[in-house]
Image: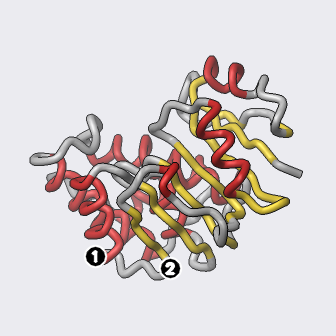
C-alpha cells in the first residue's frame, strides 16, 4: 500500500481549511490502512487509492470542521458506513461527542474497530436504524449524513433529534441540494462548495 507522508497529508487537507497536527496525520494513516484491509472482505468504499481516499473521504468530511463549524457539542451521524464524515470530524474536534448510527453489522463492527484503534473518546457506535434511536433523552447539536438518500423521514427524525439551535448538515450533489432546500421545515443556508469537486456541496439546515 502506498504510504502517505505527513507533508502529503498536510498539503492535501489545506484546501479544506484544516491544519493537520501530527496526531491527526497519524490517525489518518491508521484509518486508511484499516479501511483498505477491511475493504477486501467487506464493501466499504470504491475509492481505493490512498491519495484519493485522503481527498474524497477525509478532505470532504473535514471541511465541515471549519466551514460550519463543527467543533463542540453532540453529533449524530446517520448511515455512518465507513465512518465518513463523522469520524474524521471527531478526530479534528476533541470536544465533540459523536453517535454513529449504522444498521449493517459488518460496517458497525468496522466502526468499532476504528474507534478502538484511534483511541477516540466520546464516540459510540449504535448498530440500529435511525428510527430505533430513542429520542426522549437525546438532544443533538448536529445531525450529519453523507452516503444516504435524504427523504422526509430523515428530515423529520433530524428535526426531532436536534436541540432548539441545532443543525442538519448534509453532503450532497447540486441537484439534491436544490431539491432538499425547498423543504420549508428548515432555514437553509447557502450551499458550501466542496473544494476540488464540480458538483458536490454541503447543505446546512437550522431549526432556529
Q: Measure how far apart labels 1 and 2 are at the Cα level.
A: 14 Å
Residue 192 placement, left or right of 29:
right
Regarding residue 95, the answer to whether it shows in the image is yes
Q: Which of the numbered marks, if any, corresponds to residue 161? A: none
Mark 2, residue position:
122
The residue positioned 69% from the left and 72% from the top of the image is 72
The residue positioned 48% from the left and 55% from the top of the image is 132
Q: Could you say which is closer to the camera, residue 35 or residue 169?
A: 169
Residue 146 placement, left or right of 206:
left
Q: Could you say which is closer to the camera, residue 83 or residue 201?
A: 83
Regarding residue 189, the answer to whether it shows in the image is no
Q: Position of residue 161 (x, y in %)?
A: 67, 57
- Residue 153, by quadrant, is top right
Q: Which of the numbered marks, if any, corresponds to residue 117? A: 1
Q: With respect to residue 193, does 76 lie above or below?
A: below
Q: Could you say which is closer to the camera, residue 190 or residue 15?
A: 190
Amino acid at each position: 500500500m502506498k504510504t502517505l507522508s505527513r507533508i502529503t497529508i498536510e498539503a492535501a487537507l489545506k484546501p479544506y481549511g484544516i491544519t493537520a497536527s501530527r496526531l491527526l496525520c497519524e490517525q489518518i494513516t491508521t484509518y486508511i490502512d484499516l479501511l483498505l484491509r477491511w475493504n477486501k472482505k467487506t464493501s466499504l468504499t470504491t475509492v481505493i487509492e490512498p491519495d484519493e481516499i485522503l481527498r474524497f473521504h477525509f478532505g470532504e468530511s473535514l471541511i465541515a470542521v471549519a466551514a460550519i463549524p463543527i467543533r463542540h457539542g453532540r453529533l449524530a451521524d446517520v448511515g455512518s458506513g465507513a465512518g465518513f464524515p463523522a469520524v474524521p470530524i471527531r478526530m479534528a474536534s476533541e470536544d465533540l461527542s459523536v453517535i454513529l448510527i449504522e444498521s449493517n453489522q459488518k460496517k458497525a463492527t468496522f466502526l468499532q474497530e476504528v474507534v478502538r484503534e484511534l483511541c477516540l473518546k466520546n464516540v459510540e457506535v449504535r448498530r440500529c436504524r435511525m428510527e430505533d434511536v430513542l429520542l426522549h433523552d437525546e438532544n443533538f447539536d448536529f445531525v450529519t449524513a453523507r452516503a444516504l438518500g435524504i427523504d422526509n423521514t430523515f428530515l423529520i427524525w433530524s428535526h426531532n433529534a436536534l436541540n432548539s439551535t441545532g443543525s442538519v448538515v448534509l453532503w450532497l450533489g447540486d441537484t439534491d441540494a436544490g431539491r432538499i432546500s425547498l423543504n420549508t421545515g428548515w432555514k437553509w443556508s447557502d450551499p458550501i462548495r466542496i473544494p476540488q469537486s464540480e458538483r458536490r456541496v454541503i447543505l446546512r439546515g437550522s431549526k432556529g
